[in-house]
């Protein structure tokens, strides 16, 4: 549909989610925000929005939203914020930042908005300053490294072809919470009798839904995915349904991999490792043997552990053995091939500026040690979302770190800032969006005018850059011109008809690209990977137990995505918080009996990094030895005044330097009830 239809304007949900839903912004006759609804012209989300985004108006019109810059008077421990004009705030920033060497300035952003322009344009100023940047690392680095190690470019099948499959396996993908818009298709497949099987570490909402619809779920022990995938590959070889023609023509290391899986990974040993019955494993193998057109949908977060990339390597290797490597859907960003570098302009970095990115997962140690003298934060709430969060907050609170935060609210990170700049919401600025789950992109123009005070990332960082005397490219462009610059620079990928539709505000699925090879160093699928060897990893996918990053707690801690909130985005929305309810921990009934606790009892989760107290929910969906906390509880809602990532290690994964959130181990201790006074 066109960008404007009466009082509806088309855009894309900016949240860090693979669905990247099509949104219609409703305004009144004066152009003021009224609400959001789904865009029926968006072929992936089909006119529906999740319950989180439907209530995004709670952010736009929130009475606690920041409308004026804030500058700190006095120190971080004893000082206070006072309102300032934009000129005063920018002047304060310039005074403090100008004398600092670029290497001592940290650029700290992430997925608060997935817009290609608003998210990346601040990097122009950071590059011109020669600031230190980070490597990403928090979300999908491990999965991507594991996938690319075997299958090369992250592309896979079009998610909209899911229903053309005769078997669907959801491996570590809790679709009900993370890829909600494929759920109707899964239900239709189940009703048609197509096998749909979810593999996860507890009985997720997705497994529960599949069981109602006629599908099934398999619950494996945490971190044992590689063992299961390698066993299935062995069965494929032994029963003769390995695709030897495909292996010979498309793969490197096929013979060595066959010997490798045949030498171990038998049914009984795999059952012992994974906790599945031998019958369940054999039935899964039979489903794979019978399938002519399987669809393997992996999640993103299931690899956030010490052996996570190896799990992804094993699943991708299994797909190669079956001859269905092109049917593994992880992420779709290789479909686009946009010229995103024109937005961030890495060429603006001065000679001698640091080129080595800092590992974001380990920033707690770096910040706490005082490595940086200034930091700029946008699209990010690192005090909450980064692992080892106590060290992160301690580092951000250092008096010798000048901290600038661009935000909608006074978040836990903004509370530690020296200058806080008010930000626009996604309905109040122009941007270009592309999904990492489906194949649609959209050029979204401003739908409503922001209130007086907030500025977009482009406007805010352009003002900073101009005052610092940086090159014109860092401060002259406006958002709409940057969107056009990105689209024009991407013309080798976008044809005339697609460009016209994008400029009209439509969601557009770009035509498929013609690739040569698989995008690996050899151009073939690499069952044997020299790139992995160079990084100290086994050449072949191998089951390596998760070492827990040194944790020795009895229970595995799962910090699961919330069905009601999204990271910390809605931490200031009363309606979202009410839906989510108070923080609590889900405990297996037998574990609860052994601990002597019941529904509503309080327990303390602890490891060497911290301790947190939660009320208990008795949850039959949880296997023994695993406890679950949903979402990112606010520090102020916890008795200890710290968040769940205080318990997460700042260690990194086996490949990609990703986070190891799901390797966390804790001890669980009952908290005696208070005696009445």
Image (tube, rainbow, N blue to C red):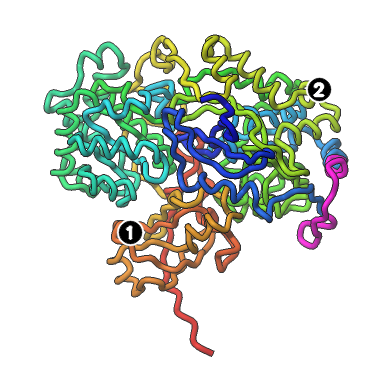
Q: Is residue 499 visible?
A: yes
Question: Is residue 209 rendered to the left or right of residue 461?
Answer: left
Q: Which of label 1 and label 2 is nearer to you? A: 2
Q: Residues within 10 Å of mark 2 (few under 14, many from 20)?
A: some
Where 518 sits versus 235, above or below? Answer: above
Say which residue appears at 64% left-offset and 46% top-offset.
60
Per the image, label 1 sits on a secondary structure element best described as: loop
Residue 522 at x, y percent in the picture: 40, 13
- Figure quadrant of the C terminus: bottom right
**For this rendering, which residue is in front, 95 or 498?**
498
Say which residue appears at 45% left-offset and 49% top-offset.
561
What residue is disc 2 on?
471
What residue is disc 1 on?
625
Residue 97 at x, y percent in the picture: 82, 39
Q: Is residue 372 visible?
A: no
| Span highlighted in magenta in the image | 73-92
């Amino acid at each position: 549909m066109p960008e404007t239809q009466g009082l509806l304007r088309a855009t894309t949900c900016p949240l860090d989610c693979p669905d990247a839903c099509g949104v219609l912004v409703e305004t009144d006759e004066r152009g003021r925000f009224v609400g959001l609804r789904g865009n029926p012209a968006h072929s992936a989300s089909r006119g529906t929005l999740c319950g989180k985004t439907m209530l995004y108006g709670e952010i736009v019109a929130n009475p606690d939203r920041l409308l004026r810059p804030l500058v700190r008077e006095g120190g971080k421990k004893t000082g206070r914020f006072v309102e300032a004009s934009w000129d005063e705030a920018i002047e304060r920033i310039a005074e403090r930042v100008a004398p600092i060497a670029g290497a001592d300035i940290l650029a700290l952003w992430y997925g608060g908005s997935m817009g290609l322009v608003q998210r990346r344009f601040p990097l122009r100023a950071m590059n011109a300053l020669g600031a230190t940047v980070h490597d990403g690392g928090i979300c999908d680095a491990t999965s991507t490294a594991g996938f690319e190690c075997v299958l090369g470019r992250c592309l896979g099948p079009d998610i909209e072809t899911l229903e053309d499959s005769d078997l669907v396996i959801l491996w570590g993908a809790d679709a009900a919470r993370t890829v909600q818009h494929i759920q109707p298709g899964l239900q239709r497949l189940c009703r048609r009798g197509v096998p749909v099987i979810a593999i996860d570490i507890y009985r997720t909402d997705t497994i529960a839904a599949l069981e109602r619809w006629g599908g099934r779920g398999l619950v494996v022990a945490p971190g044992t995915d590689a063992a299961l995938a390698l066993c299935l590959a062995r069965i494929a070889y032994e029963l003769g349904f390995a695709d030897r023609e495909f292996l010979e023509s498309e793969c490197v290391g096929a013979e060595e991999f066959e010997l490798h899986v045949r030498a171990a990974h038998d049914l009984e040993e795999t059952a012992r490792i994974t906790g599945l019955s031998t019958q369940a494993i054999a039935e899964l193998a039979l489903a794979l043997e019978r399938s002519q057109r399987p669809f393997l949908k992996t999640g993103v977060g299931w690899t956030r552990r010490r052996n996570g990339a190896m799990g992804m390597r094993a699943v991708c290797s299994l797909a190669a053995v079956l001859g269905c490597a092109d049917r593994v859907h992880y992420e779709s960003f290789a479909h686009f091939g946009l010229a995103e570098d024109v937005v961030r302009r890495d060429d603006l970095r001065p000679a001698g500026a640091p080129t080595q990115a800092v590992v974001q997962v380990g920033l707690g140690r770096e910040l706490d040690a005082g490595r940086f003298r200034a930091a700029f934060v946008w699209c990010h709430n690192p005090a909450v979302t980064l692992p080892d969060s106590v060290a992160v907050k301690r580092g951000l609170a250092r008096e010798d770190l000048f901290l600038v935060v661009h935000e909608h609210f006074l978040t836990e990170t903004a509370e530690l800032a020296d200058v806080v700049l008010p930000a626009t919401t996604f309905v109040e600025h122009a941007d270009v969006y592309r999904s990492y789950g489906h194949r649609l992109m959209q050029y979204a123009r401003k739908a409503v005018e922001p209130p007086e005070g907030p500025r977009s990332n482009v406007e805010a960082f352009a003002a900073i850059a101009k005052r610092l005397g940086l090159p014109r490219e860092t401060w002259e462009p406006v958002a709409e011109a940057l969107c056009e610059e990105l689209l024009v620079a991407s013309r080798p990928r976008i044809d005339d008809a697609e460009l016209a539709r994008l400029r009209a505000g439509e969601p557009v699925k770009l035509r498929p690209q013609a690739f040569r090879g698989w995008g690996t160093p050899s151009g073939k699928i690499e069952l044997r990977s020299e790139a992995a060897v160079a990084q100290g990893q086994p050449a072949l996918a191998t089951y390596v137990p998760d070492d827990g990053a040194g944790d020795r707690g009895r229970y595995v801690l799962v910090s699961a995505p919330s069905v009601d909130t999204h990271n910390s985005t809605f931490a200031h929305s009363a309606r979202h918080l009410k839906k989510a309810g108070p923080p609590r921990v889900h405990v297996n009934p037998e574990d609860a009996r052994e601990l002597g606790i019941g529904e509503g009892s309080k327990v303390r989760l602890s490891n060497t990094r911290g301790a947190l107290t939660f009320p208990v929910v008795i949850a039959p969906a949880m296997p023994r030895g695993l406890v679950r906390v949903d979402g990112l509880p606010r520090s102020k809602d916890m008795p200890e005044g710290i968040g769940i990532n205080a318990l997460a290690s700042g260690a990194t994964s086996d490949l990609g330097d990703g986070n190891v959130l799901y390797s966390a181990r804790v001890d669980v201790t009952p908290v005696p009830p208070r005696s009445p006074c």
